[in-house]
Image (spheres, helix red, strand yellow):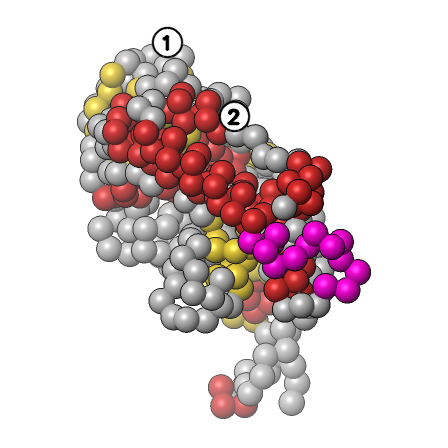
Amino acid sequence: MIYVKKPDGTIEQYEDDMKRALQIDKELYKQQGNDFGEIYTENSLPDEDKVKLKLLTESELLQKNKDIAIAQLSFKCKKERIKILDDTRIINILSGATAGYPEYLTPANVAKLIETYKQIYHLTSAKILKTTKKSEVDKIMKELVFPTEQDIITNLSKG
Amino acid sequence: MASNELRNKTELTSVTGDEWVYVQDNLTPFEVKKISITRVQENGIIGKSIRLLNSYIPISASSPWLCMSLSDRILTTSNYSSDFIDEMRSRKVIYDEFDSAVSAFSGSWASNVFTLTDNTANKSMIAELAEDYLFAGSPSTGWRILHDGTNEFNITGISVSARTITVNLDSKTASGTSISIYLNRVYGSTTSCKHFSWAGLGLYMTGQNKITGLRRRDKFQGFGFGSSTFSGTGNADHLYVSRASQFGFGSRAANAGAFSYTATAGGLNLIGDDGTNGDPRTGSKTEMESGTLLAYMFVGSYAD
């Protein structure tokens, strides 16, 4: 199916073979200075509209939002860890090539550092999985805080 | 051999342009006239024959050929033969011209809106008509003319998805169960026709569901980006879009269930030198490498 979300928010449905016709109409509207709306396929239709059309249930949408948040969480954890210690330096430390590195960068401390981010990931993803609303997922992601480089160094130096 | 001597046809191995031919001018009483073979060669079918020249020759009594690159304009019987004007005024949109040749498109009127019946001919026709309408800038006058069998109307709107054509009734009533679209008529006139410029246009061989006489905008084959799928063990670089709506280039980490990638802020520069073919040449329209010529249509006769 093809879906047209009109400027007033209503959604019209068309058979697949109407895509070209709708595209021409959209161009005609634009040429005359009018807003035709947006043309979507079932895949590209925004999730909230899929729910309106019952192509997606509320619980499926919540699960999708959780999956997305967890994927973003994974990405952020890795990005934050790389800011402090990138993959190349980790390999160097684990292989003993530590010349020029601070003393606290030992294999044991590298493991601790990685565990710090794994903990953030696992604790946060567990919280996300328990949510019952998208707003709760958004709140968790918004309030997500990572340790600063100074926090990490202080922590590793103690150990 | 003298030039005015009748020669055996086997001797005429080439035509120099100095030869003459006799043509029937009238059946009853039977009459013939003698005209130069050059004139015969240069004549064509009024309103239909096209010839190509590599320089501009303005239309004149001695060269009754209309340059198709000239801007949009109205041609009248003041300058052009009525045969030519009539021929142009008779031209209409014909779907599947080689076979079913549909020129009356069925449907029904509701006030100033004609809704075409849902069939192949109508759907193809309105899509092609809309293409020309877009080309023209969707005007409300001076374009193709809709005829309901009784009255003619200016087209003021088209919806391909709804199969509707909206017209300006101009104090008339639209009726009937079919319409025709005239390509070169001028609203309210029987002694003139409209020329639509071909300047800058390539030529498209019509046939199938394409309609002779309508213009087509440039386009290129559509394409899309999709997620890469991995079935092998290789870690080659891939372009991917993740389910988290992140977009980038990356490589699949060995024995890992997720991607590692090095997407950078600012996204991708999709237009660039591919290392072989140089910087892309971009423009407002898609064109092919071209020669440049002028096309002319035979108008029969012309008077300044």
Please determine whether, in this image, residue B87 is positioned above or below residue B192: below
Q: Nearer the viewer, residue B207 or A123?
A: A123
Chain ID of residue with mark 1? B
| Marks 1 and 2 share the same chain | no
Quarter of the figure with the C terminus of chain B: top right
Task: Say if the magenta span includes residue A99.
Answer: yes
Q: Residues within 10 Å of mark 1 (few under 14, many from 20)?
A: few
Q: Quadrant of the N terminus of chain B?
A: bottom right
In the image, is residue B24 part of the stretch drawn in magenta? no
The answer to whether residue A52 is seen in the rendering is yes
Amino acid bearing label 2:
Lys
Q: In the image, what residue type sits under mark 1?
A: Ser
Magenta region, mostly helix, strand or loop?
loop
> Does B255 sit above or below residue B16?
above
Does residue B6 sit above or below B185 in this rendering? Answer: below
Q: Is residue B19 above or below residue B71?
A: below
> Which residue lies at the image location 55% right of the left edge and 53% below the top edge?
A111
Of tags 1 and 2, which is closer to the observer? 2
Secondary element under disc 2, as helix, strand or loop, is helix
- Give the magenta-colored segment's residue range: A98-111
Residue bearing mark 2: A142
Count of marks, rendered view? 2
Nearest the viewer among B240 and A38 is B240
Residue A113 drawn at (x, y percent) = 58, 48
Marks 1 and 2 in Cβ contact (< 8 Å) = no
- Residue B260 placement (x, y as % from top left): 52, 56
Q: Which residue is mark 1?
A: B171
What residue is drawn where x is 49% and y is 38%?
Answer: A120
Q: Position of residue B155 (x, y in %)?
A: 41, 25
Residue B165 location (% of width, % of height): 34, 26
A14 or A93: nearer the eye?
A: A93
